[in-house]
Image (cartoon, rainbow, N blue to C red):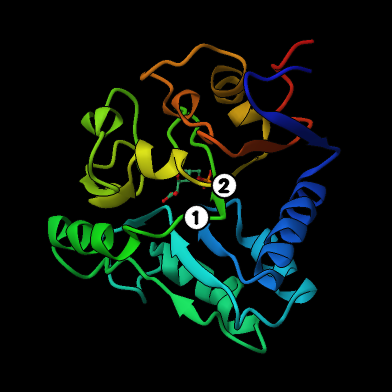
Amino acid sequence: MRARDAELIVTDDEESAAKQVAELLAEAARAGSEIALTGGSTPGRAYELAADLEPDWSGAGVWWGDERCVPPDDERSNFGLARRTLLDRLEAHPGRVHRIRGEDEPAAAAASYDQELRGTTLDLLLLGLGPDGHVASLFPNSPGLTETERLAIPAEAKLDPFVERVTLTPPALRSARRIVFLVTGEQKAEAVAGVLAGPPDPAVPGSLIRAESGETLAILDQKAASRLRD
Ligand code: 6PG
């Protein structure tokens, strides 16, 4: 199987993909890295396994690639997902937790996150992938895809949950030293093929996101990789 400007790891099943990501997260935490987490339903298991592998994240900084504009205790919150599956399971919390303030007005939350992130390079950026090819909260053909200056912007959701978002922009995502896509399941296979094997296309936002001067890795289970050809 081949991918454009990205390395592939294809695992037998979802649990093995989660284990691969957990190892990278644990290694990054041990190294005191700046780590950006993703939301959604896929990464939770990887976060649980990462907490088991490395319970001491005191040297690490944690960020988010995007957030739903809801309070942190709302079940749709990406921070809330990480708190339940990772942070609350650690013996030593990350030394730096940079939560996107989903409870604030989106433009204000985005502007303050932009300032908070400016000057920091992410060492590891974890990204999920929507069935429409969106990454973070950069949806197909959305205005945020052409952003060149800001690092974080408000965004309108085009998929459930239909709440306003704050998302990192393509320049912010591409500046990461290592981008790791974690994608599992047959329902993502079409999007995976577009993102990893297709040309850069604003209709498939993930196809526009590769580490500019770092490495891009895609960790997929067989089902998600099933449309990738040799
Ligand atoms: C979010 C995520 C989003 C997610 C994809 C895949 O806020 O929802 O950041 O980009 O990674 O939508 O979500 P699933 O893992 O639930 O399929």
Looking at the rendering, which quadrant does residue 169 occupy? top left
Q: Residue at x 55, y 12 (%)?
A: 198
Q: In this view, does 30 lie to the left or right of 188?
A: right
Q: What is the quadrant of the N terminus in the image? A: top right
What residue did someone put label 2 on? 177
Q: Residue at x 79, y 31 (%)?
A: 222
Q: Is residue 149 left or right of residue 18?
A: left
What residue did someone put label 1 on? 122
Badge 2 amino acid: Arg
Looking at the rendering, which quadrant does residue 13 occupy? top right
Above or below, 45 against 172 in this view is below
Residues at marks 1 and 2 touching, judged by CB atoms closer than 8 Å: yes
Counting from the top left corner in percent of width and height, residue 203 is at 37, 18
Q: Is mark 1 on a helix, strand or loop?
A: loop
Q: Is mark 2 on a helix, strand or loop?
A: loop
Badge 1 amino acid: Leu
Q: Which residue is drawn at 43% across and 59% down?
A: 64
Counting from the top left corner in percent of width and height, residue 67 is at 35, 57
Alpha-carbon neighbours of circle 2 within 10 Å: few (<14), some, or many (≥20)? some
Of labels 1 and 2, earlier in sequence is 1
Q: Which residue lies furthest to the bottom in this view?
A: 91
Alpha-carbon neighbours of circle 1 within 10 Å: few (<14), some, or many (≥20)? many
